[in-house]
Image (cartoon, rainbow, N blue to C red):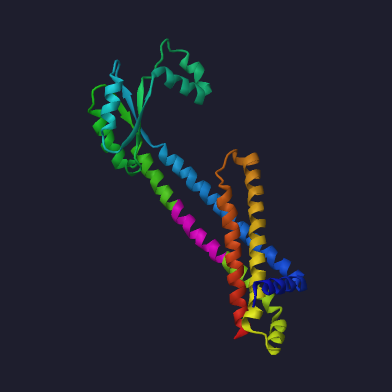
């Protein structure tokens, strides 16, 4: 059977059964949209957790005066240290005033800036845990010019535990949603093909080959999946824009990942669903 004939027969199948096609398309679109929406939530959840993880750092308060250049050089030699940023006392005061505007009156009672100069030590990912923070902090405290270090080790461990729990829950929920979406799409396509079982039986009686019967249905599944994925993608963009404007202000969204992901899932589910359903009537 040529591709041209397959497409022509597929279009005839769609036009002859328009109501069933659009009902199935609606279910496919909504199912893919829910999957895409969960993907959007999941990506932003992991993005937020990654940002929190990257903010884990050690702050070293300095004696006055201190040789900043030598101190930074020595800290950078410590295994696990990624970067060292110097924050002067004036800069620290400006940051505090910017973050907590209500502290201006409190800080005004001091004749001099009460905040010491400090170094912010950024760590490699493998050392962003209580043990890694403690080990590196201990080595930093041995250096001349360092008065005190803070790093919140217990809080970091709690954050890691929460992250693992959220990840496990998210993976479990993802599997449930994926299998639910696949089940709903397959069942919907199967029901639409079952409603045309008489049409398939007649084609078999007049001697139509299995490929002549199956390929148009596969083409219909392709169209349903492609259009359904496109609709799901548009709905995801609309939801994203609403969430950004009215709720969150900023969300991570990769246009092409969602575009190709929605359409690819739709096409795969549509073709496989149609193929599996039609094979039951060809046996």
Q: Is residue 45 above or below residue 80?
A: below
- Up the image or down, 146 lies above or below 246; here it is above
* Residue at x 58% of width, y 39% of height: 250
186 is within the stretch colored magenta: no
Q: Which residues are magenta?
A: 166-180
> Between residues 25 and 58, which one lies in front from this camera angle?
25
- Measured as percent of width and height from the top left, residue 203 is found at 70, 85
Left or right: where does residue 105 sit relative to residue 127?
right
- Asked if 239 appears above or below 271 in the picture, the reply is above
The image shows residue 48 at horizontal and vertical percentages of 49, 43
Q: Image height check: is 279 above or below 33? A: below
Give how far across and how far down residue 26 sits, in percent: 69, 63
In the picture, residue 79 is in which quadrant? top left
Residue name at image x 35 percent, y 26 percent? 119
For the C terminus, which image quadrant?
A: bottom right
Q: Tally the numbered discs.
A: 0
Which residue is at 61% across, 68% downward?
A: 270
Judge by depth and name the residue closer to the eye, 151 or 205: 205
User: 64 and 220: which one is in front?
Assistant: 220
**Residue 188 showing in the rendered view:** no
| Residue 144 in the figure: left or right of residue 202 | left
Assess whether residue 174 is covered by the magenta stretch. yes
Residue 154, image x and y in percent?
35, 40
Q: Is residue 278 visible?
A: yes
Image quarter for residue 277?
Answer: bottom right
Report the quarter where the N terminus lies: bottom right
Q: Residue at x 62, y 41 (%)?
A: 244
Decide whether the magenta segment is chiefly helix, strand or loop.
helix
């Amino acid at each position: 059977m040529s591709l041209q004939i397959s497409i022509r027969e597929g279009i005839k199948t769609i036009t002859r059964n328009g109501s069933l096609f659009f009902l199935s398309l609606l279910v496919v679109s909504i199912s893919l949209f829910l999957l895409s929406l969960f993907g959007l939530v999941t990506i932003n959840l992991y993005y937020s957790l990654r940002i929190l993880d990257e903010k884990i750092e050690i702050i070293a308060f300095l004696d006055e005066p201190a040789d900043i250049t030598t101190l930074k050089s020595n800290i950078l030699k410590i295994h696990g240290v990624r970067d060292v940023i110097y924050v002067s006392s004036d800069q620290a005061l400006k940051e505090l005033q910017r973050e907590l505007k209500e502290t201006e009156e409190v800080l005004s009672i001091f004749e001099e800036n009460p905040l010491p100069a400090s170094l912010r030590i950024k760590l490699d990912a493998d050392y962003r845990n209580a043990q890694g923070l403690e080990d590196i902090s201990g080595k930093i405290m041995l250096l001349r010019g360092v008065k005190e270090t803070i790093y919140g080790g217990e809080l970091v461990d709690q954050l890691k535990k929460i992250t693992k729990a959220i990840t496990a829950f998210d993976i479990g929920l993802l599997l449930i949603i994926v299998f639910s979406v696949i089940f709903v799409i397959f069942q919907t396509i199967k029901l639409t093909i079952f409603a045309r079982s008489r049409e398939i039986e007649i084609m078999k009686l007049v001697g139509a080959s299995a490929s002549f019967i199956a390929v148009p249905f596969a083409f219909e599944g392709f169209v349903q999946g492609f259009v359904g994925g496109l609709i799901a993608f548009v709905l995801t963009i609309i939801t994203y824009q609403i969430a950004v404007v009215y709720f969150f202000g900023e969300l991570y969204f990769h246009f092409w990942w969602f575009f190709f992901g929605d359409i690819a899932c739709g096409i795969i589910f549509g073709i496989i669903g149609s193929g599996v359903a039609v094979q039951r009537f060809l046996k």
